[in-house]
Image: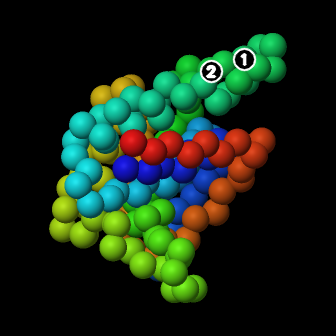
């Protein structure tokens, strides 16, 4: 399981021009699920994301989590994180889990993150999503388990 965590200001997600999700500030997380991932990996990664200290404290040091600052999380499933372009120019996605297995694990990850006390907004699994976000910093952290 792989996550790209970006500290953001206002972020919105649309599908077919319709606003689906929006957060005022917090983190946008792009989540890739690979073949063989299980609930244990999701539990670990969601705990890590909710406690990741990437927001500044009163001294300007990154010492606060999204929970500490009252931010929200936009969690977006993104199988392309497991795209392999090492051979040629067209990525192979054989490492990405099949949708029928990945979607329930994505939904589980949403609930695992909510159990951490974080407000979570979602994307639409498998949809062509348009995301507008204001990167803050920018701060981008890659997590993989």
Task: Return the x and y of residue 11 as percentages of the image width and height.
Answer: 61, 53
Relative to 131, is 124 on the left or the right? left
Quadrant containing the C terminus in the rendered view: top left
Residue 77's place in the image compared with 65, above or below, is: below
Residue 30 makes an appearance in the image: yes
Q: Residue at the location (39% across, 37% down)? A: 45
Q: Residue at the location (22% across, 46% down)? A: 38
- Residue reaching furthest to the right: 59
Q: Residue at the location (33% across, 73% down)? A: 94
Residues under numbered marks 2 and 1 in contact, where contact means CB atoms less than 8 Å apart = yes
- Which residue in the structure is indicated by mark 1? 57
Task: Return the x and y of residue 105 as percentages of the image width and height.
Answer: 24, 52
Relative to 32, is 13 on the left or the right? right
Which disc is residue 64 wearing?
Answer: 2
Q: Residue at the location (54% across, 50% down)? A: 4
Task: Return the x and y of residue 68 as percentages of the image width and height.
Answer: 56, 20
Q: Residue 114 occupies which quadrant of the picture?
A: top left
SS at mark 1 in the image: loop
Task: Return the x and y of residue 52 as percentages of the image width and height.
Answer: 54, 28
């Amino acid at each position: 399981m792989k996550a790209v965590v970006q500290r953001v200001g206002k972020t919105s997600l649309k599908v077919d021009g319709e606003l689906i999700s929006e957060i005022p500030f917090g983190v946008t997380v792009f989540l890739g699920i690979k073949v063989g991932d299980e609930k244990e990996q999701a539990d670990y990664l969601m705990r890590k994301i909710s406690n990741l200290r990437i927001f500044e404290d009163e001294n300007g040091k990154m010492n606060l989590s999204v929970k500490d600052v009252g931010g929200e999380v936009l969690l977006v499933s993104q199988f392309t994180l497991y795209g392999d372009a090492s051979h040629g120019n067209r990525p192979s996605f054989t490492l990405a889990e099949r949708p029928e297995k990945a979607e329930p694990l994505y939904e589980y990850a949403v609930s695992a993150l909510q159990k951490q006390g974080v407000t979570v907004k979602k994307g639409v699994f498998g949809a062509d999503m348009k995301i507008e976000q204001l990167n803050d910093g920018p701060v981008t952290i890659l997590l993989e388990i």
